[in-house]
Image (cartoon, rainbow, N blue to C red):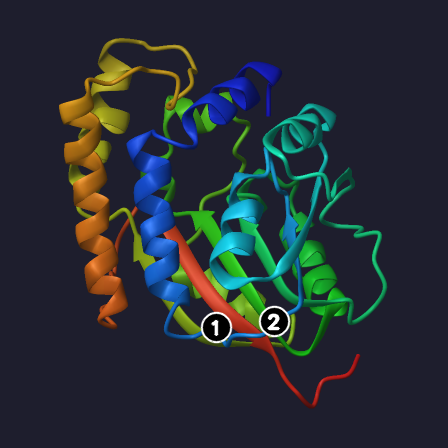
Amino acid sequence: MTPEELHNIYRAESEFWWYQGMRSITWALLDPLLPRGLAKGLDAGCGTGMNARAIEERYGVRMRGVDLARLGVEYCYKRGFPRAAVASVTDLPFADHAFDLVSSIDVLQCLLPGGDERALREFHRVLRPGGWLVLRVAAFQALRSRHSQYIAERHRYRAGELLRKLRDARFQVLRWTYVNSFLSPVALVKFRIWENLTKQAPHSGVAANLPPWMNGLLRGVLQSEAALVRSGFRFRFGQSLMAVARKRESDAE
């Protein structure tokens, strides 16, 4: 992640349609599942700290965060989230069974080959038996964009692959769905045709200042997806893939 993109994210996370809409989808997925009373959580790959703070405020979990980018951790402090440190998600500096919840949002796709499997094993290790895992990853190689290149995204997942890796890491998957689905046809045309025709260089996808009406319209599209996710609907295609899983109560390793 470049310093410029971390700055773009920090500036955009509160109001930009994609961040607002994806948080709505996350709450729609988690609200029916997460129990109250979870004490300690970790955001693995916390970026600028927005997701960790949002989870903490919504569910009352005292969150910590780690990220490889020192600038990201500095932004965490600036945002008022001081429980963040520089560390790798593939080598977490925490004891076994330290957390009730681990979240990792748009991180696995940026790791080197094999890094996702190591990260999942680390998430399993630091979770207590019965602990919860919340994942979001990029989906479908056909939807790789110039923004994907800009943020050094290395891989995009399909459900079968992610679910297999979760099972191999000894997680029990409770729910999964693709998300950011309704806009996928537009994204496919933009990423596979328009960006090639115009020979665009890799660039940020969140730096643009959209007119309020457009920002609101796009946010509304994602919020309509959130309503369907909350009802139990599973999307079969989308630009992102989300999963909620648990470490089994009987698994003390």
Q: Position of residue 51 (x, y in %)?
A: 52, 45
Q: Can residue 234 be seen in this view?
A: no
Closer to us: 136 or 198: 136
Closer to us: 17 or 190: 17
Question: Would you say 219 lies left or right of 67 here?
Answer: left
- Amino acid identity at mark 1: Leu
- Amino acid identity at mark 2: Leu
In the rendered image of this protein, does residue 97 appear above or below residue 184?
Answer: below
Q: Please tell me in which quadrant of the rendered image residue 56 appears.
A: bottom right
Quick one: quadrant of the N terminus? top right
Q: Please tell me in which quadrant of the rendered image residue 118 appears.
A: bottom right
Q: Position of residue 221 (x, y in %)?
A: 17, 43
Closer to us: 215 or 112: 215
Closer to us: 42 or 190: 42
Please tell me the numbered disc located at residue 34. 1
Q: Position of residue 229 (x, y in %)?
A: 26, 64
In the rendered image of this protein, does residue 63 appear above or below residue 4?
Answer: below
Residue under the image location 59 percent in, 31 percent down: 79
Please tell me the numbered disc located at residue 141. none
Contact? badges 1 and 2 (CB < 8 Å): yes
Quick one: label 2, few (<14), some, or many (20+) residues within 10 Å? some
Residue under the image location 65 percent in, 54 percent down: 63
Quick one: quadrant of the C terminus? bottom right
- Label 2 residue SS: loop
Q: Distance between the residues labelled 1 and 2?
A: 8 Å
Quick one: label 1, few (<14), some, or many (20+) residues within 10 Å? some
Q: Please tell me in which quadrant of the rendered image residue 219 appears.
A: top left
- Label 1 residue SS: loop
Question: Would you say 122 lies left or right of 153 here?
Answer: right
Residue under the image location 22 percent in, 28 percent down: 215
Q: Mark 2 points at which residue?
A: 38
